[in-house]
Image: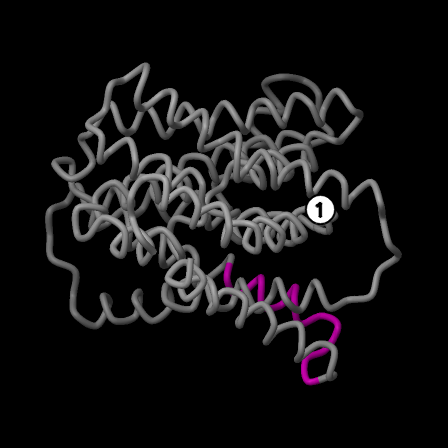
Amino acid sequence: MLATLEILLPVFGLIFAGFACRRRGVLGPNAASELNRFVVWLALPALLFNTMAHATWQQLYQPAFVATFSIACASVFLLILATRLLSGRHLADASVDAIAASYPNTGYIGFPLGVIAFGQASLTPTTIATILVACVLFAFAIVLIEIGLQTERTPHKLGLKVLRSLARNPLIVSPIAGVLFASLHVAMPASAETFLKLLAGAASPCALVSLGLFLAEKRPSNAEAGGVSLWLTGVKLLAQPALTWWLAARVFGLAPMLVEMAVVLAALPTGTGPFMLAEFYEREAHITSRTILLSTVGSVVTLSLLLMLMGHRT
């Protein structure tokens, strides 16, 4: 448990730094949104481009693992989406809630935790999971949000509007550009590599500080939002890893170590991506921010217990 807590402490620290800066008046009321804009328009696109530009087909060709992780994420996403839509939630907001329950923090927590528990063998599965979450799941949520925000109801006009919006969205364009660059099979200039790494390195810290800034804003208490956040947290920390285990062990018959890696990756707390989407599209982010915080706190216990059950003494 101490090793798990040690990995999560920087996450709490960055959230608290943003919280403290806002409460002390060091950063103003627009700081959360402005910092989030930096992440969405510069830092995260650099991270997505760099990830896809350096991914190789040989590295990513693990169809059973890809299917396991993709189906688990998609199933949780679609279940929450349908449930929230049936409760009367707007499509854009329901999509944000759905990704909050299915978006594991593979980038910031998955890599260090995987190396501690499984060694260097964890790097490839974690990379695959990161691409699936940060590029595929993220893109699917963005498409649904864009559809929900369009007022045009004629199918072909709606489609054109959504495509135009997606073509201007840096979170969609950047991974596609990365894939196209990788297909050229040319070396990236050292200066460009450094530029992308510097920007990409700022994505997670700035997103976490932005989350802390948002949480520091005083708002009326909302019991319903708190209940939904707890529900989404339970789905994220318990239901998603359970479904992943069933798919990995019973359906696709992965090797025991890959089963364990898939389950641990699925059991990670919610990353900052859903919060960034809520802020970027100016949707209500209270449920999302609380889900990220609650799942991060809860994962100290759930991840530690899970790793101990697997025989990894963390």
Q: Reply above or below: 71 against 40.
A: above
Q: Identify which residue is drawn at 65% across, 47% down.
A: 288
How crowded pointer 1 is (Cα within 10 Å; few <14, some 14-19, many 20+) is rated as: many
Q: Identify which residue is drawn at 78% across, 24% down.
A: 87
Q: Quadrant of the N terminus?
A: bottom left
Q: State the residue in front, 49 or 233.
A: 233
Q: Quadrant of the C terminus?
A: bottom left
Q: Reply above or below: 148 against 154.
A: below
Q: Magenta region's main secondary structure?
A: helix
Is residue 30 one of those drawn in magenta?
Answer: yes
Q: Identify which residue is drawn at 47% across, 41% down.
A: 167
Relative to 76, 211 lies left or right: right
Which residue is disc 1 drawn over? 287
User: In the image, residue 6 lies at what x, y percent?
Assistant: 41, 66
Q: State the residue in front, 128 or 306.
A: 306
Relative to 296, 264 lies left or right: left
Q: Which residues are magenta?
A: 26-39
Q: State the residue in front, 172 or 235.
A: 235
User: In the image, residue 185 lies at what x, y percent?
Assistant: 11, 47
Relative to 234, 111 lies left or right: left
User: In the image, residue 106 lies at what x, y percent?
Assistant: 39, 48
Disc 1 marks which amino acid? Ile
Q: Identify which residue is drawn at 31% across, 53% down.
A: 313
User: In the image, residue 300 lies at what x, y percent?
Assistant: 50, 54
Is residue 194 one of those drawn in magenta?
Answer: no
Give residue 146's quadrant in the image: top right
Q: Secondary structure at mark 1?
A: helix
Give residue 136's quadrant in the image: top left
Relative to 168, 220 lies left or right: right
